[in-house]
Image: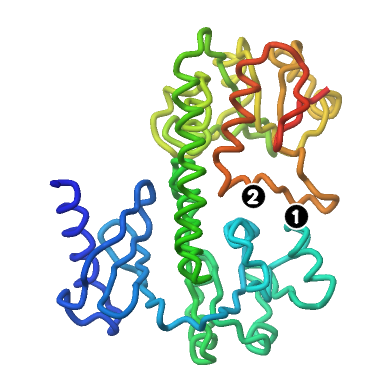
Amino acid sequence: MMRILVYYSFFSFLIIACSNNSVNNISSVSGFEKISYSKAFGFARLSDTRQLFYVDGKDTLWSLKESDLPSKCKIAVLSSVFAGFIEELNCQSSIIAVDNINYFNDSVVLDRFNQGLIQEIGEEGQLKLEAIIKLNPDVLVCSSITFKDKSLVKRLTKSGIRLLFCDNFKEQHPLARAEWIKFFGFICHQHQLADSVFRVIEKNYLNLQNQNKNQGNPPLVLTDALYQGVWNVPGANSYTAQLIKDAGGIYAFNDKSDFYTYPLNLETVLKKASNADVWIHVNQFKSLNEMSMADPRYILFNPFSNHRVFNYNKRENISGGNDFWEKGVVRADWVLNDLSIIFQNDKNNFPNLYFYTCLD
């Protein structure tokens, strides 16, 4: 009961603090919907509609009433990550614009692009303003990068286009990122389906997590590789570290206690993790030979010698678009299942992996 009161009080505060004039007082709010993992958004139930709030700490950065969206919402997305949620809801017909089609893998989205039903409008920082205005989407989903361009925001808002900026990459728990399907269910008027899909993802994920707790001999896991002379490793409270933990592994850099990335040199990583059992997320490498050609010192790591190096490139298209960052963000349960198989299998035979490949 106390948790419910705290949750209600927190979002009541956010509504009162919100600068959106559509909410004048708390009396119109009949309740709040439970958000289990995400710390970035919430839903209020009003007398005649629902309202979405995007929050940063204790500040409500924007809000939107469901009744303000048309029944068939035309959506522009500036990331394949955003599209992945819409695709999981089978609402690809709502997407009328994307940043760069080369980043996308969904067959329906690609077919609609080839039919001229989806247009490219440029990447963040290089948007084609006139093209966006001509397409006239109801909603443009972007990151805070676009929202910081006040001149652009003013032009688009004046044209009647709603900008919904959201930095869901800041969520560090895989289920928190997956829960964003509720956010997109709101935009697509599919909140019941979004809730249902998330319950399946959550159940699958938690079942796998519990099973992995009982596995013996957890492997030591190394991540990433050199990029322009720097080895960037995620902190122990990051999205990647959480996946490793929930899949039954021990992260090699658990002593890096924060969630952000730490830039290290190869010598430091070698000293810390040369004896790792498994190596994952090795940038754009597709083979061990390619890695050794880039830097012969990679062979000094045990996983390299033992052929236990894995990358999330199994569903990468010819243009480099990676489904791991499209479907994988929402289907956290599938990602966890892949990693669970990798960590528990000491043989180099992984035919059932969905996102990952074992480099040879």
245 vs 93: above or below: above
216 vs 146: above or below: above
Q: Which residue is mark 2?
A: 327
Residue at image location 57% in from the left, 58% down from the top: 85
256 vs 91: above or below: above
Q: Are marks 1 and 2 in contact (CB under 8 Å)?
A: yes
Q: Which residue is mark 1?
A: 105
Q: Nearer the viewer, residue 192 or 350?
A: 192
Residue at image location 37% in from the left, 65% down from the top: 54
Q: Is residue 113 left or right of residue 174?
A: right
> Residue 101 appears at what percent x and percent y?
76, 64
Q: Quadrant of the C terminus?
A: top right
Picture quadrant where residue 131 is located:
bottom right
Q: Nearer the viewer, residue 8 or 258?
A: 8
Asked which secondary structure carries label 1, the reply is loop
Sequence-wise first label, 1 or 2:
1
Asked which secondary structure carries label 2, the reply is helix
Q: Is residue 197 left or right of residue 311?
A: left
Q: Is residue 337 left or right of residue 261?
A: right
> Residue 190 appears at what percent x and percent y?
50, 66
Q: Nearer the viewer, residue 266 or 65?
A: 65
Q: Amino acid at mark 2?
A: Lys
> Residue 141 appears at what percent x and percent y?
54, 69
Q: Amino acid at mark 1?
A: Asn
Residue at image location 53% in from the left, 25% down from the top: 247
Within 10 Å of disc 1 (Cα), the crowding (few <14, some 14-19, many 20+) is many
Residue 82 visible: no
> Residue 93 appears at what percent x and percent y?
67, 72
Residue at image location 29% in from the left, 67% down from the top: 44
Q: Is residue 131 left or right of residue 147?
A: right
